[in-house]
Image (cartoon, rainbow, N blue to C red):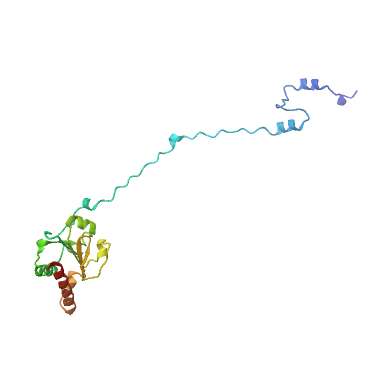
Amino acid sequence: MSLTNIKLPGFVIADLYRNSLIAPEGYTAGSEAGAAAVAEPEPVKKEPAPVNRAAEPEPVAVKTAPAPKPADLPPYKSLGNNKKQISVVVNYPNEVFVPESDLQFLTKMLDACKLNMADVAIVNHATAPVVIDRLKTQLQPAFLLLFGVEPDEIQLPINFPSFKEQPYAGTTYLFTPALSQLNQEGDAAKGLKKKLWECLKRMFL
């Protein structure tokens, strides 16, 4: 008998290789399902990592400071006592209020209207930009003369031409060229002064 042709029973083979061959669960010798079980192990399901809520920053509310009200802002510096609530707004970048020559011209106009410096308050738009709501809160003008400062520059919600009195919200406004332009010699300046005088007479006389 040839040794290469010896056939051993299955229980003998199993007993000989019991410590070397371990069949996976569900394995059946010769079956396709068993082969698949050996070739492809089941995937391991990973649990999602827990979310650390404590590490997330809490939303922070940003507080913005409210816009200051006109009454909370510092008052405008003014020249005069404002006894008759007549505000005069000028625009002189290099002056505290008005240069001497133009102040004399303004004083003469006031005198012709039977007014003086005690009756008015002069504010220089160049040193502290005028805003109408803030000015009205401080000076409460019955009349407001704008010399070289246009209505929209002080945030007036209305517009009107020069040398035209304009009543609005309890105040009468007048817009004219700058005092330095009115305070000149020559026919052109004389014509402007005449227009101004006609307006002042209607307003104060």
Give the residue displayed 22% in from the left and 56% down from the top: 134
Give the residue displayed 9% in from the left and 70% down from the top: 112
Residue 79 found in image quarter? bottom left
Residue 46 spot, x, y in % from top left? 58, 33
Q: Is residue 11 above or below residue 68?
A: above
Give the residue displayed 11% in from the left and 62% down from the top: 119
Residue 141 spot, x, y in % from top left? 17, 60
Q: Nearer the viewer, residue 182 or 137?
A: 137
Q: Is residue 133 above or below residue 13?
A: below
Residue 193 found in image quarter? bottom left
Q: Is residue 39 left or right of residue 84?
A: right
Q: Which residue is at the far right?
A: 1
Q: Which residue is at the far bottom?
A: 187
Q: Nearer the viewer, residue 187 or 18?
A: 187
Give the residue displayed 18% in from the left and 77% down from the top: 191
Q: Nearer the viewer, residue 46 or 163?
A: 163
Quarter holding the N terminus is top right
Q: Is residue 172 above or below residue 15?
A: below
Residue 53 found in image quarter? top left
Quarter holding the C terminus is bottom left
Q: Is residue 140 above or below residue 60?
A: below
Q: Is residue 55 left or right of residue 66?
A: right
Residue 199 spot, x, y in % from top left? 17, 71
